[in-house]
Amino acid sequence: MAATMRLIRGLRGIIVPCGLRFVSVGGRRTRGGFSKPLGKHPQVKQGILEGVPRRIPGTTKVSYTNSKGRTFNFSVPVAEITHPQVRLTNATGSWREIDTSFCELGDMEDDMPSEVDAYLRAESDVCSVPDLREAFTSLCKEYVLMDTSGMKSTLSLTELNVGPDYEHYDRRLRRKRHWLAVRHRFEDVRHIIWPELGKGASSPCLNHALTARQMLDTLLWLDAASTFCVRKVHASDLAPEEEFMPLDLRREVEIVAHYVSREPGFFAPENNAVELFVSCAALCSNHGVAFSLFFRGQHVTESDALSHTNSIFLNMPTPCTTFGAIRVMAVLGSDPSQFRFSRSDGTVERGVVLLALSRLVGVEAFGNSDALENVGEAELCTILRFCVNVKEQNAAFFVRMKKANKTGSRVDHEGEEEEVSFVLKYEQLLHMAVSRCKHLLYQLDGPRTQVMSENGDIPLIDLQKHAECSNKDALIHYHLSMRSAQGLRRVALGAQTSAELVELIQRLEVGDARVSGNTLLMDLVNHLSHKAAAGKVSISLREVNTVLPLLARIQSEAKGELGPRYDRLISILGTSIGAAVQGRYNNEDIVELIEGLAACQIVPSTFRQVEMTLYRLVMGHECSLSHVTRILRAFCALHGVEVSPVLLTSVASRVADSFGDRLGCHKHVKEEEDGECEVLVGLMQALSMCKYAALPSLVLLSWQSSLFNGNKMSLDSCRNYAALLACAADSTRAHNTLLSQQMGRESQRLCLYYVQNRGHDDISEFSQLVTTLGMVGCQRNEKDEVWAAALSDYIRRQSLTEARGSTMSVSELACTLKETLELCAVVNVQKPDVVTVIERVLLNRFKQAEAATSSNEACEELATSACCVVGLHHACEELRRAAADTLRRAILRAEEALEVSLEERRQRPQDRSFEVAALRATEVKNVHGNLILRYSAALQQGGMASYVEEAGF
């Protein structure tokens, strides 16, 4: 019994009370069951539905959320939403009220009502004109300040939904109605607010109803509304397409300019002159009106009749803030020629422009050292472009002032004081702009460079009650956050801005040849590649064409090597080029692209796309003849003589068609067609560079048509056409001797005309001329010694530096030396300076080749040039001996190559048959044997064989 009680006491702790059940999980005792219900059913996840299409045509997604919080998606046909079904049974309970405000037919047929309609229906009197102007201005303001956030640019059936797409669809339609109302009301009020000039007799009271300031204010709001017009036309729109396009406000701008010019003191400082000046200039720039119309009749006397540009600068207000000066620079930068105030000798011609520019860059706007610390990338580009235009238009003036500063000449009169003051202000502004560029590029104040709006003011829109907002009494638009309200914005140099800054800084330092040493330019180029590689922005063809000339200059200074630091940039440029040629492009941009690639000798991975695009332009006659000439020259620089024959034939047929069209009416050739003759000569010259086989026939056609005889061509075109005639005469000499002689005489006549009217030439032009005269066989005529004297003077006038001669190839130098010596012998000219320099350059080339190890092609070119030089008995003896030594080394190399080929023939590879090895050995023997024979013959004919034998062959 005692044992039983002890067992009961031991089991007392594990006895489960009634109604509770304990479950042991992992050795721990947990309470089971539910003390109270959970209040919701357990959620069961749905499996993936296979085979159900996500997008069913003709339907839209509708979401439904039940009371439990669960969401269901249905694909409902659009027709059930736009045209709900009506059940005939129990019709009283199934009718639904549908909002039809989106219906386009009813909304677009009638104009949107506005306050302007009431004033137009009323009788016109003087008192109603200002009210009408206020109503029309308010209508334009409401459209300009309308909230467009969230509006999509396309329409689709899925937007007919109960969600935000439907709301945007309705707002987009309301915006279209508002714009049409503005356009239609403008046609009604344009002759009331801006009356016709010279027609005031019909309504004399209307001319004085509004002031010039009121007319300008309304015109500015109308121009802003026209800038933000709809532009995008949908197929369902009932209005014609031209009603969605911007307005033509040229007439209104001219009328406002007329009234402003008759109102003295309109641009007075107390009237916020800078804002008015900028607004009027922007209106004139947008609508093609001369800005000088606003100042006609002001400050002009009979003794001092200022030009239009002078009147603009005379009335230009003095900006007191930095951003005011930047705005003035922006509106004046459309025509860079108006910044010219000096003559070609550097003296000041237009003092009014100089004084105005001095006020523009004065101490009021840019006096502080930190004046540009709040300037972003767009404003920085505006300042640098202004500086570039001023420097380029007055380059001689800045050179004169720089020389005067070095010599320390004293200032004599007040005009020179103004000049010195302007130069100091200009240099200070330029230094500040470059410093700001470095600040933004290197991020000197941290990775997040920020600037405030103009003067740190909160950018509240004037009269924001017109802005579309849920609360009309709100002063700040609900899309403006606190950061935007404070005027803070982040500034960083993007790819487009970097490319523009590269162009501007390069143009500023165009006089300095140290482009590769400019760290700022190189860092801007690398920054451009980093931004593009990171995918921040895309690079357009304009940016690519800006960078390529800079790379070409760097490559020329680096002796033809860019280095691995530019590999990433070249890769990015190739990708950008491939993307750009697939979209819309300008012919000028694509031609500049191929010229830039040819200058850099870069063939990107997407070059095939560029090539096909250019082929389509040329063969489809979609570009001008000047563009075709530039394309052929670029292809020749890239591919050499391996330009597509199909392309050359297409170009030649176009030139022949042009000759045929002009041949029928050559008696009526006008002076303005002289430019086309020069273009045709340049195009045939490009075909000659590409080694077009049928070029002599084309030149013969041009000569037989006599189209170039009656037209005035430039001297360069005369020289090029003479070279073309000489080549054609040389090729037709075997078939038609008489025709060849006639073309040769015409070529000689053009050359002599060129010689008589041309002074100093570059070595390339001089080489072309003497080669042309050598081809036509210039013989001395004792009856006419005028041409001989002119040719003698021309040869004596030529000068050449060793640095310029070192840039030419050895073959060009040898050919030029040969033709020049022969020409000097004909006209009895002693050895001129140009011959001495060429001989010195060739001698250095031959001596450098003796110590250096060059490729086979370079050695063969050098040996060919030596063959030409060794036979020139009028050349200096030292040069001929150097050429003979070059030929001796070439013969030794050819003999060594023969011995190597014989040794390889004895050790024939196992994978090569006896016949293949024998053919290969015979080919090598013939090639090197012919070289040995040709070099030996040149030494024998030049009389230098004995010298080579004595030197130890």
Image (cartoon, rainbow, N blue to C red):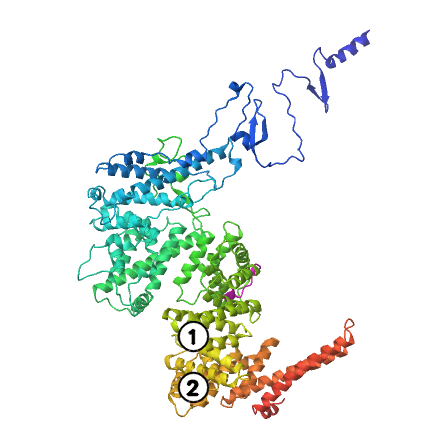
Element carrying mark 2? loop
Question: Which residue corresponds to the image point at 27% horizontal and 44% vertical from the top-left?
Answer: 191
Q: In which quarter of the image is residue 20?
A: top right
Q: What residue type is labelled 2?
A: Pro
Inspect the magenta stretch and tell me whether residue 599 lies in it: yes
Please provide the residue range marked out in magenta.
Answer: 597-607
Q: Is residue 408 or residue 760 the one in the foreground?
A: 760
Left or right of 815 on screen, residue 231: left
The quadrant of the picture occupied by the N terminus is: top right
Left or right of 116 on screen, residue 203: left
- Label 1 neighbourhood size at 10 Å, few (<14), some (14-19), many (20+)? some
- In this view, 528 is above or below 226: below
Residue bearing the label numbered 2: 832
Q: What residue type is labelled 1?
A: Leu
Q: Is residue 124 or residue 925 the one in the foreground?
A: 124
Residue 707 is marked as: 1
Left or right of 422 on screen, residue 155: right
Inspect the magenta stretch and tell me whether residue 479 lies in it: no
Tell me, yes or no, if residue 835 can be seen here: yes
Question: Which residue corresponds to the image point at 76% horizontal and 11% vertical from the top-left?
Answer: 9
- Label 2 neighbourhood size at 10 Å, few (<14), some (14-19), many (20+)? some
Element carrying mark 1? loop
- In this view, 327 is above or below 140: below
Tell me, yes or no, if residue 369 can be seen here: no
Q: Position of residue 520 (x, y in %)?
A: 44, 59
The disc, 2 or 1, on the residue closer to the chain's N-terminal end is 1
- Nearer the observer: mark 2 or 1; the answer is 1
